[in-house]
Image (cartoon, rainbow, N blue to C red):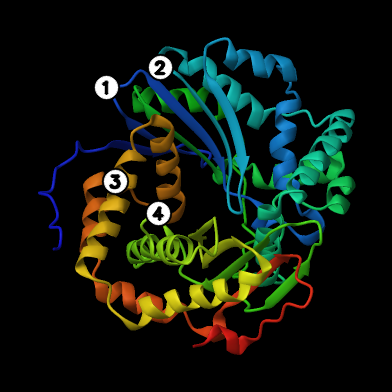
Amino acid sequence: MTRTPKKSRHHRPREIERQVLHNGIRVVTERVPHVRSVSVGLWIGTGSREELPHETGISHFVEHMVFKGTKHRTAEQIARSVDSIGGGLDAFTSKELVSYNVKVLDEHLPEAFDVVADLVRNPLFEPQDIEKEKSVILEELKMEVDNPEYQIHELFSSRFWKGHALGRSILGTKQTIRSFDRDMIDKYYRHFYSPSNILVTAAGNLKHKDMVRLVGEHLGDLKKRPFHARKSKPKPHAPLVFLNKESLEQVHLYVGVPSIPMPHEQRFACYILNAILGGGMSSRLFQNIREKQGLAYAIFSELSMYHDAGCMLVYAGTALRSAKKVIKSIVHELNEVSERLVSEEELRRAKDHLKGSTVLGMESTSSRMGNLARQELYFKRFFSLDEMLERIERVTAAEVQALAQQFFDPKHMAVAMLGRLEGFKLRREDLTR
């Protein structure tokens, strides 16, 4: 018995407005009048993929350093200023973005944006703070290196994107972190924190003109200057890489293939393919490898999508005695979805799963704020919720199969393994039936 889609429910149109200031700063807002919160993000179009080899980790380091003090606030005052109005202040660095964001009650928007703008505009980068922060980030690096899931992800990325910045760590290395000084940090900051490389997005109970006025008051006098991104197109590789680590009880592994970039027209079919393979407890990988065979506790698939490249990965944690069987079972599932059309029932389940997560993901002002940034940065246009749901609904089983056939070529499969691997062998032929 197959489930039929429920009658389409139209969602309220998104009240999105966009404006570019005279100095190149973009401001995008979405008014959500039925809530009391406002979320604001100040986005810098940089990340670890923009770093030169000797700069590895500097985007993340700068993100930390802006919280150490500005011309107007000490580190403690920065923390207290948002805490005192019941808000949340956060930041993160990814491969392609750095974000500084805050969520507050609508009445506190002016004070909150004053803090975020101050962080991005007026960092001090004091030499003594730089030295202290090196110790903090080196401890963060140690903590992550002790985490096998982090280690296997970094091992896979470093070989899959070999020779490219996408394959290098966001945190950096001990050597690069220790090498950072004020001149190096200031040079990087001045290049990338340029007005034309800054995006402000805001969602919640606000008016567009008020947000534009706030941005103009705090950042409008920044001088417009030329900005050139460093992006070079990455080339994926297909290594089989094994790292022996005797201290681990479990073997951690990734199987990955090149996929499509974020702005690709087939991205919704790619999301459906990912959901069918390993996107939840009803997925093929979870049901067949964990539930039926009992070979792994954690197993899932995921997508890493960038401006001009992408990767689909399958992760599993298992015992060494089961590792080869797990890999062969993963390959079997990849072949199955390549060779046979998914059933209407399974396609329906995947669509409903993706639709549900899309709608639920738009329920908070912070998620809407992030969605505005992704759409501006990757698509240069904005999609209504109904349009996104309609694009999901249009995906066919044939489109899913065509993508699977494009992706899952054994010659393009990369495998990385971490754990007690003494005596373990895997050949390229093992990735075929």
In the image, which is nearer the foreground, mark 4 or mark 3?
Answer: 4
Label 1, label 2: how many angstroms apart (C-alpha)? 11 Å
Local packing at callout 4 (Cα closer than 10 Å; few below 14, some 14-19, many 20+) is: some
Quarter occupied by the N terminus: bottom left
Residue 170 lies, in percent from the top left, at 69, 51
In the image, which is nearer the foreground, mark 4 or mark 1?
Answer: 4
Element under disc 1: loop
Local packing at callout 2 (Cα closer than 10 Å; few below 14, some 14-19, many 20+) is: some
Residue type pointed to by label 1: His
Element under disc 3: helix
| Furthest residue in direction left, as rendered | 7
Question: Which residue is pictured at 37% across the width and 66% down the height?
Answer: 273
Residue 66 lies, in percent from the top left, at 71, 31
Question: Which residue is pictured at 56% across the width and 75% down the height?
Answer: 325
Numbered mark located on residue 356 in the image: 3
In the image, which is nearer the foreground, mark 1 or mark 2?
Answer: 1
| Furthest residue in direction top, as rendered | 84
Mark 4 touches mark 3? (CB < 8 Å): no
Q: Which circle's residue, 4 or 1, is located before the other in the chain?
A: 1
Quarter of the image for residue 320 reads bottom right
Residue type pointed to by label 2: Asp
Q: Which residue is identified by label 4?
A: 281
Q: Which circle's residue, 1 or 2, is located before the other in the chain?
A: 1
Element under disc 2: helix
Label 4, label 1: how many angstroms apart (C-alpha)? 34 Å
Numbered mark located on residue 34 in the image: 1
In the image, which is nearer the foreground, mark 2 or mark 3?
Answer: 3
Label 4, label 3: how many angstroms apart (C-alpha)? 15 Å
Residue type pointed to by label 4: Met
Residue 23 lies, in percent from the top left, at 53, 39
Quarter of the image for residue 99 reads top right
